[in-house]
Amino acid sequence: MVMAQPRKPRLTALDWADAALAAIREGGGLKSVAIEPLATRLGTTKGSFYWHFTNREALIEAALSRWVETNTDEIITTVETEPTPESRLRKLLTQVTKPSGTDPLELSLLASKDHPQVATALQQVTTRRITYIADLFENLGFTETESRQRALMAYSFYLGHAQLTHAVPSALPSGEEFPGYLEATVEALLRRG
Amino acid sequence: MVMAQPRKPRLTALDWADAALAAIREGGGLKSVAIEPLATRLGTTKGSFYWHFTNREALIEAALSRWVETNTDEIITTVETEPTPESRLRKLLTQVTKPSGTDPLELSLLASKDHPQVATALQQVTTRRITYIADLFENLGFTETESRQRALMAYSFYLGHAQLTHAVPSALPSGEEFPGYLEATVEALLRRG
DNA sequence: AGTCTTCCGTACGGTAGCGTATGGAGGTGG
DNA sequence: CCACCTCCATACGCTACCGTACGGAAGACT
């Protein structure tokens, strides 16, 4: 009798790219994109990897491209269902500041910002996001300069908050205090001179 | 005739600790605290290192202790010369947001936050700073809760701004636009409901 | 001067990962 | 069914670094 074998699956380049992203997420940086450990994790060997990619850099390139494409869109599309610009901004900040709202992958990439390919990926994602937030403020009636300023404040706040969430969570308001904190922040961002 | 020899200096543990901090600063993370390269840089060998320290962890420990002691004090003391709480807050934000105002070492440590010793060091420094900023707000007449909220906003903003400064500087207001941006931020933090 | 302690140089073995070479299994088309 | 192509396994050499062992130089002490 033949047992249902775990059916050794042939891998694709995408499988490797996703595994690399998972490794970055969990390992906290680009350093954990190591071929041999990844191979073990995928239940295969380096032989597979070097068939699909020429070297480690190529894998990183593929993984980062995949990240740039897939990460921001989903958040923006969910936020876009909100009716008014203000509710969108509120929803956006609520989403991204809740403890589980920040993908560790993002912080891992910030931690690896010295790597040139990561730098360009961050560049793209960051400018895109800031532009989107600035548009929200413009739709609220702020001037272009004001909008860009407040978008930057909001995004800087988000980045710092994400850092604190994962590095010093005890410094943040907990549980029931949190909504008030977030509301105070939104107010500060929306209040006019 | 005897040339003035470079006088081979005996090293101390502190020399190694400082070299480690420099390596973290320039290398962008804890990973660049590597004994053999450090030895080369100090013009010595591993033999020296393993005399002063038992292993790499001990060096990291020493370096981080040194950082925790020496980093925040200087900034706070300079700021304390300002007369009013508001001018102190303004000065503080001005200092830490100017492009050269953020020590890359700090970002390098945030990038290595997964390391347990780095985590505790960050914990100490962060809570100390946030407490100090919250005190400033309290002296401005805000309630304790408001003060803590705004201190967190300010500190999160600082962290995010630091990230952007070093990762995507092109996203930030440049040159002559910067003072206005900073002023708008300070206003947002100070404005009352 | 002789001894003792401090500090460092050097040689060694061990681990982790990159990249290469090469053979072979298993599916696919003629 | 045979030749071929796709994909993977294995073995190898190479680099970088950690930690240990041990000997020796150079000042300090008497």
Image (tube, coloured by chain):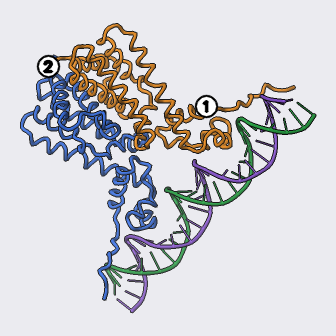
Chain colours: A blue, B orange, C green, D purple
Direction from residue A148 to residue B1 in the image, left or right: right
Q: Are marks 1 and 2 in one subunit? A: yes
SS at badge 2 = loop
How many C-alpha atoms fall within 10 Å of the one at disc 2: few (<14), some, or many (≥20)?
Answer: few
Vertical placement of residue B39 versus A38, above or below = above
The image shows residue A26 at horizontal and vertical percentages of: 36, 51
Residue that badge 2 annotates? B193
The image shows residue B27 at horizontal and vertical percentages of: 50, 38
Res B158 → quadrant: top left
The image shows residue B47 at horizontal and vertical percentages of: 68, 43
Pointers 1 and 2 in contact (C-beta within 8 Å): no
Direction from residue A74 to residue B16 in the image, left or right: right
How many C-alpha atoms fall within 10 Å of the one at disc 1: few (<14), some, or many (≥20)?
Answer: few
Res A117 → quadrant: top left
Q: Residue at x 61, y 44 (%)?
A: B36
What is the chain identity of the residue bearing mark 1?
B
Res B33 → quadrant: top right
Residue that badge 1 annotates? B15
Please state which of residues B149 and B173 is positioned toward the viewer in this rendering.
B149
Vertical placement of residue C23 versus D17, above or below = below
Q: Residue furthest top?
A: B83
Which amino acid type is shown beneath numbered disc 2? Gly
Which amino acid type is shown beneath numbered disc 1? Asp
